[in-house]
Amino acid sequence: MKLKRRRASEVQHLSSLLASADADVVEASLQTLATFLKKTIGKYSIKDASLSSRLLAFAQGWGCKEEGLGLTACALDNGCDSVAYELGCTLHFEFYRVAESSAVNEATGGLQIIHLPNVNSRKESDLELLNMLVREYEVPLDLRYSLFTRLRFARAFGSLASRQQYTCIRLYAFMVVVQATTDADNLVSFFNAEPEFTNELVSLLSFEDSVPEKIRILSLRSLVALSQDRSRQPTVLAAVTSGGQRGILSSLMQKAIDSVSNCSSKWSVVFAEALLSLVTVLVSSSSGCSAMREAGFIPTLLPLLKDTDPQHLHLVGTAVHVLEAFMDYSNPAAALFRDLGGLDDTINRLKAEVSVIENGLQQPCGSSDGGRMSTDGTVGTSSSLDDIQPLYSESLLAYHRRLLMKALLRAISLGTYAPGH
């Protein structure tokens, strides 16, 4: 009970920080909240209607795709035309005000419209402008936060850097809404307003050079959060396997694995980890497993078995779990795994890990010469969202190594069990 109260208190503190006029504070608060919920998924839910309302206000962003203000357009430089740009920089807020009982004040009730163009060029601070509008339009207390959020978004639209930061804020808020809010109607109303949002999350992944990696990582994590809801997983699966985005995940995974294994800076370990997290969730269903197998993920993941950089142990372990899922669901997948040399690579990798334990050869954490495994299983030399390239401690590396060895043993078991073998 004390732990629950403490968690509720911590979440309440973070909720209060969302009212900060400093975008960095808001982003950090949402990132902390998203991290907290990721570690307690299934064990904690947000029942505070006020916090849910604040999160939804951030998740809604500037507008919908039909207005030219979709997620992708807002994240790109020159992604919006002049009409959409003007709309994005305009504060438009409508609300109903209840009239006073006296006849004198009766005319002040009804629909109120605040329409303020070019908010980004105003000299007043956000709080000064908010106070002016609250006094002029007599905005009720329970609507001031929503107004403030709309004001902040309109102000941020004027520059690409601030627009991209608020895109991150939007995605953090969306993840939290999906993972922890108890009111399903909130999510239904969100997607009713933006039916293309899932497709736009996938579309963002294809902009490798024009969209910051941080935004693309948050897009992946948002897709993971959606996929963990079984009722919405088919929508995510359709978005990544149909139309112009067909094959996008396997293509990105191949590039990420090549980059990470060769110590290139183009693709970070965190991006590869987010990709693997999404695939892990998708292969947890028979339809998802079939779709990912058809997308060519078995040959795509196999090269990761030869990456022996200690800092990549968790990536290799996750890849082995995905390969397990393929073999568990499908005998043809197990046969393909063997035909491509996956069983031999798995056995060789297990030999290498056992050798590391026996000889005490674990490299210091942060070593960049982790190496590539040769075909005989020996190790050779290879050429901040979470700080983008995280470094794991010795104890955590040992933990990841144990998990990897267990996963390798299960994969070998599944790979050797097949009719006729």
Image (spheres, helix red, strand yellow):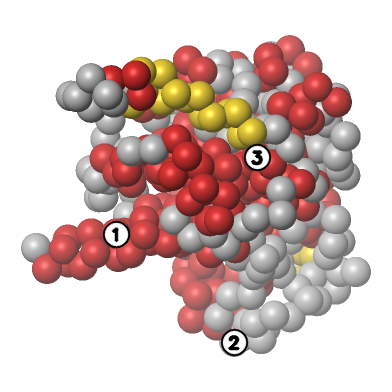
Which amino acid does the dot numbered 1 rest on? Gln
Measuring 23% from the left and 43% from the top, which residue is drawn there? Answer: 47
Q: Is residue 100 left or right of residue 24?
A: left
Look at the numbered disc 2 and give the secondary structure of its residue.
loop
Which amino acid does the dot numbered 3 rest on? Ala
Which quadrant holds residue 216? top right
In this rendering, is residue 306 above or below 247?
Answer: below
Report the residue marked by disc 2.
Answer: 360
Crowding around mark 1 (Cα neighbors within 10 Å: few <14, some 14 to 19, many 20+) is few
Measuring 57% from the left and 50% from the top, which residue is drawn there? Answer: 129
In this rendering, is residue 127 above or below 402?
Answer: above
Visible in this render: residue 204? no
Look at the numbered disc 3 and give the secondary structure of its residue.
helix
Crowding around mark 2 (Cα neighbors within 10 Å: few <14, some 14 to 19, many 20+) is few
**Between tags 1 and 3, which lies in front?**
3
Residue 285: image tag: none
> Farthest residue toward the left?
1
| Dot placed on the residue nearer the N-terminal end, 3 or 2 | 3
Report the residue marked by disc 3.
Answer: 154
Quick one: quadrant of the C terminus? top right
Measuring 18% from the left and 24% from the top, which residue is drawn there? Answer: 101
Q: Is residue 204 left or right of residue 319?
A: right
**Separation (CA) of disc 3 from disc 2:** 57 Å
Which quadrant holds residue 397? bottom right
Residue 12: image tag: 1
